[in-house]
Image (spheres, rainbow, N blue to C red):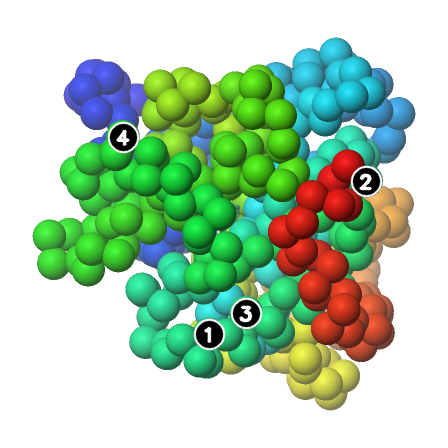
Amino acid sequence: MNNFVRNTHKLNKHYIGRLYSQVVTPFEVKAEQGSCVNYDKLIEQFGSDPISEEQIRRLEAITGKKPHHLLRRGVFFSQRNFSDILDAHEKRNSKVPPFYLYTGRGPSSQSMHIGHLIPFIFTKWLQDTFDVPLVIQMTDDEKFLWKDLDQKTLRTMTVENIKDVIAVGFDPKKTFIFNNFDYMGHMYRTVSRIQKSITTSQVMGCLGLTNSSNIGKIAFTASQAAPCFPSSFPHIFRDEKLNSKIKCLIPCAIDQDPFFRITRDISNKLGFQKPCLIHSKFFPSLQGNNSKMSASDGMSSIFLTDTDKQVQSKINKSMSGGGATLEEHEKFGANLHADIPYQYMRFFMEDNDELERIGREYSSGRMRTMEVKKIAVELLLDIIKGHKQRREQITQQTIDDFMNTSQDKWK
Ligand code: TRP
């Protein structure tokens, strides 16, 4: 970092992102020309910290659980105050949960794509590992404000997405799912306190908004910030006196960090703990590692509703890191980093030894692209099949149980 950047950082960290040529906000991911997002630089740009080997070792030591493959393989790679969560878990007593988990989803399409599963799969693992409450926010208001979608369409999208989220397998006794349009009244007091503490210019700089942005977009930061504070969930955290002590851990893709950077700045002033974060990299699109999978672009994504044939054909056409000709492939081997089927295996294949074997064989040129694509197709079909089966079991009653605002299940 040169001096100019360093000094500017001190002046106003919210503007720091503008000084780099890659732009990452919740609404725009732009890498430097022709390359993929530079994640080391992003850590520096955002002022977060890498997840250390020591933290992963400690997590294993205190929970007795083998660290999740998304953690071991560096898909989750960055954090803010994650050690505080480990401390809280170590010092826990049986009466109050040491922290809670918060994640969310903006329902902008009828069907989620496989990349959307990643933060949820990891969140489920965290919930199982730490046995803590989890709140999941559906930001139907966000998508209404940002996209050309009417409220009726959004309602169906929200319900469909909620089913996809539930199908990941969260514990219904410890999970609360809510959508902003319907839940807002319960958290509006907290939302207003947040709105009062953040200025328009802070939000604009951090999210890349302008003077002509609609005012809903400016105010929305408070909707996404509110669940970081236990006062937004009086049915879960009933003893108000504890609200200043309870911590929150947010697993999310790193593009969501700007919201929480603003939130962390005001937390103490409002009498709450700063939210802790654990960030993932983006899930690459079928076209290659330099763009992320987007549900609004049907050709860049594999949807959870795709048929077996569609999945197969999409993977077969996806960006390959194999050699251009067979001779070249045998001579130089495959570029694993550029190879989308291999990259998808890194996200979804649990078996470490098998993944390593494929990586070794393929990068040395001994294994062919078609073979790797076939393994990737089988893996994804298996995941989608399991997902569809669990999703079919979901009834209106299941949804109501997850979205119930009564205190009963939290006693
Ligand atoms: N803004 C996120 C999206 O568009 C949804 C979201 C709300 C979220 N709260 C969150 C994501 C907390 C991660 C963590 O998908």
Q: In terms of depth relative to the viewer, which is nearer, 281 or 119?
A: 119
Q: Which residue is mark 3?
A: 158
The three-letter amino acid code for the residue at tag 4 is: Ser
Using the image as rendered, state which of residue 367 and residue 232 is in the foreground: 232
Sequence-wise, the earlier of marks 4 and 1 is 1
Measured as percent of width and height from the top left, residue 231 is found at 51, 33
Distance from the alpha carbon under mark 1 to that under mark 3: 6 Å
Indicate left or right for 352 with 281 as reference: right
Residue type, mark 1 in image? Leu
Quadrant of residue 61 within the rendered picture: top right
Check the picture and name the quadrant holding the C terminus. Answer: top right
Determine the CA span between mark 4 and mark 1: 30 Å
| Secondary structure of residue under mark 3 | helix
Question: What residue sits right under mark 1 in the picture?
Answer: 154
Q: Residue at x 44, y 51 (%)?
A: 185
User: Relative to residue 97, is residue 63 drawn left or right?
Assistant: right
Q: Within 10 Å of the Cα at label 1, are there few (<14), some (14-19), or many (20+) other Cα atoms?
A: many
Residue bearing the label numbered 2: 128
Q: Which residue is mark 4?
A: 197
Vertical placement of residue 23 versus 236, above or below: below
Q: Position of residue 20 (x, y in %)?
A: 27, 38
Asked if labels 2 and 3 touch by Cβ distance under 8 angstroms, the answer is no
| CA gap, disc 2 and disc 1 | 31 Å
Between the residue at mark 3 and the residue at mark 2, the CA separation in whole angstroms equals 25 Å
Residue type at mark 3: give it: Thr
- Vertical relation: 252 (above or below) 145: above
Q: Is residue 241 visible?
A: yes
